[in-house]
Image: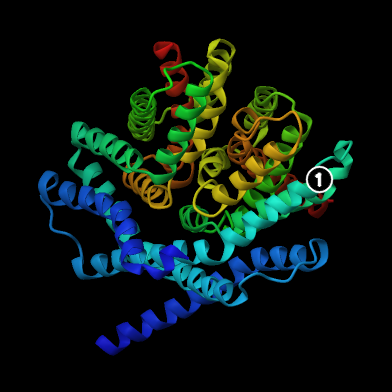
Amino acid sequence: MELFLNPTKLLLATAKDVLPVLGLLVVFQMVVLRRPLPRPGRIVFGFVLVLVGMACFLGGLDLALFPVGRAMALQLSASAQGASNWVAYGWIYLFAFLVGFSTTIAEPSLIAVANKAEEASYKAVSSKGLRIAVALGVAVGITLGTFRIVTGTPLYLYILIGYMVVAIQTYFAPRMIIPLAYDSGGVTTSTVTVPLVAALGLGLASNIPGRSPVLDGFGLIAFASLFPIISVLGYAQLVQWVVRWRKRTQQV
Amino acid sequence: MLTELSLNLIKTLGRALLGACRDLAPIVIVIAIFQILVLRQPFPELVSVLAGLVLVIVGLALFVVGLDIGLFPLGETLAEEFARKGSLVWLLVFAFALGFGTTVAEPALIAVTREGARAAADAVLIDNTPVAINRYALHVRLTVAFSVGIAIVVGVLRILRGWSLPIIVVGGYILVMVMTLFAPKEIVGLAYDLGGVTTSTVTVPLVTALGVGLARTIRGRNPLTDGFGLIALASLAPMIFVMGYGFFAY
């Protein structure tokens, strides 16, 4: 609400994010490479769009999604208070899964990277398929992360097993997808997902008896960056199997 | 000429707006269903929520179009010029500056390191005074920014030399697991989360454009298999460096 009433403040905050990057690019282009900027008008216009777009996006999130999402995460974790076993937390798992999926689909940097991947692979990788695979990975990761908070099992065990799965998948997956799959782990956790997921984790950790927000509230982001790697590698393997199977049936 | 250009822009923006509506539909549906069916509560401040939603859609559309006409072309030209000029030192300086510079001021990083410093003070790993807490938060932040700079440098060298990414990443994982065994318990959770926090909305598209641009310009490199991987290293390095800082600090 505060940010919406103060659009100049919001624009300034966004400019602080974007301008150093623009400055770095311009300095290296003009001073180090000694080349003029290609089509400067277009580039400046693009940066203005990015700036205004980010300000609107963040302002809108603060106004619409975050208050509602936070309130729901708190209500849900409060309603689970006193539940005796982990099955009683069903609604929380469903909410975690759906929030993970739906926020990742709308994540701006994932959209940018997926489009780039489609272009770099000459459409062999579909932008939509990649985004759905990443979103499913985040959804499963966050669900498992809330399960970990509820049961209080140690974080590093899950991460260790996850790393092993990634290492084994890397051995079998098609070579071309591996760098992209590794990247999709870092891409997912930015503007939209982190605040909602952090609210869910902290809300759960403070409402469940025996959990401390400091030790158990963290870690959901780590889950959300590990599982997309597994799901994208899995998606590529699935596509490879389908292609092979089709070839075999055609030959027969 | 001018009208043709603006007509094109309107078309692109229109398409981006439609795309943004489609991208945001799942969130709206999920929240609405939970609010109505599960929690059974009236919607608080419906008008401001709707206004915010419109802002989010417009903002997402402008952001995506702006990236396509501003940030991406600039990042790729820069990568091409560097590759053509063949000045390795300047390319690596640029890679480090890009990683360090975009990370050190990242709002999410500042927030998370502050939380981590408070947790460390509660666990009596550092003195519970504002000075000690601020110093610890600043040190962790600088460590993370430095590690992202190093990660982008290593990633660019990988693209140039054609090193194998799986070996670097899986090797990094093994290092993380070994360090987890020995690092102080309070810093492990923080270090894991910091890996995901570092890669922001502006950095990710730009770093991707740099990698793909480099791989496209250098002969014998494939944009898909060699151009990606920078972000993976940028999320791996902070875990290693922050746990390393944990050994050093305690």
Q: Residue at x 64, y 52 (%)?
A: A135
| Image quadrant in which you'd find residue A226 | top right
State the residue lying farthest toward the bottom: B3
Residue type beneath disc 1? Ala
Q: Residue at x 48, y 34 (%)?
A: B115
| Image quadrant in which you'd find residue A85 | top right
Label 1 Cα crowd, 10 Å radius (few <14 / some 14-19 / many 20+): some
Can residue B1 be seen from the camera position used here?
Answer: no
Q: Residue at x 35, y 40 (%)?
A: B103
The residue under label 1 is: A80
| Image quadrant in which you'd find residue B33 | bottom right
State the residue lying farthest toward the front: B129
Residue B97 vs A6, above or below: the answer is above
Q: Please, what secondary structure does the residue beneath circle 1 have?
A: loop
Observer-nearest of B143 and A175:
B143
Image location (x, y in percent) of residue B97: 26, 37
Colour scheme shown = rainbow
Image location (x, y in percent) of residue A31: 10, 47
Q: Chain of mark 1?
A: A
Image location (x, y in percent) of residue A25: 23, 50
Q: Residue at x 26, y 65 (%)?
A: A43
Residue B101 vs B57, above or below: the answer is above
Q: On the picture, is A108 further left or further right than A199?
A: left
